[in-house]
Amino acid sequence: RSAEALRYWTTGEWERAIEALSRQHADQPDDGGVLYNLACAEARAGRFEAALGHLEHAVRLEPRFLANAQSDDDLAEIRDDPRFPRPAA
């Protein structure tokens, strides 16, 4: 179902991607993939607080997203925030 939102990555329509992913998140609140993509779109749209919260939730649900987040260009704007999830040292 994320395909609807992911098509907006090519056009940079972040608000539309956020709307689509928010609807999906309402239907599937514990889907880590939806939360991760929502965090990515929010970071691209400048919604940094929301992005950090959704990313943290996504990583809690699906730890594999921790590694993805470290190099995902969509999250570049929030990576320097001290709340950004990091691998254990």
Image: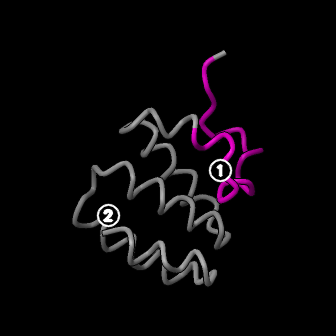
Question: What residue span does the magenta drawing correspond to?
Answer: 68-88
Residue 5 drawn above or below residue 80? below
Q: In the picture, residue 40 is in which quadrant?
A: bottom right
Q: Residues within 10 Å of mark 1 (few under 14, many from 20)?
A: few
The spot of residue 76 in percent (x, y) is 73, 54
- Which mark, residue 25? 2
How far, Cα to Cα, is label 1 from label 2? 21 Å
Q: In what quadrant of the picture does the C terminus appear? A: top right
Q: Main secondary structure of the magenta part?
A: loop
Q: Residue furthest top?
A: 89
Which of the 4 image quadrants contains residue 83?
Answer: top right
**Picture layout, residue 58 above or below residue 75:** above
Apparent side of residue 64 relative to residue 72 in the rendered image (left or right): left
- Measured as percent of width and height from the top left, residue 1 is found at 30, 69
Say which amino acid is labelled 2. Answer: His
Residue 23 at x, y percent in the picture: 31, 74
Up the image or down, 88 lies above or below 40; here it is above
Crowd band around label 2 with a 10 angstrom C-alpha radius: few (<14), some (14–19), many (20+): some
| Mark 1 lies on residue | 72
Indicate the secondary structure of the residue bearing disc 1. loop
Foreground of the two, 45 or 10: 10
Residue at 47 percent of width and 53 percent of height: 36
45 with respect to 16 (left or right)? right
Task: Residue lying at the far left in this picture: please name it.
Answer: 27
Q: Residue 69: horizontal and vertical position, in percent?
A: 60, 44
Q: Give 51 or 67, whichever is nearer the viewer.
A: 67
Q: Is residue 2 left or right of residue 59?
A: left
Q: Residue at x 66, y 54 (%)?
A: 75
Q: Of marks 1 and 2, which one's residue comes earlier in the chain?
A: 2
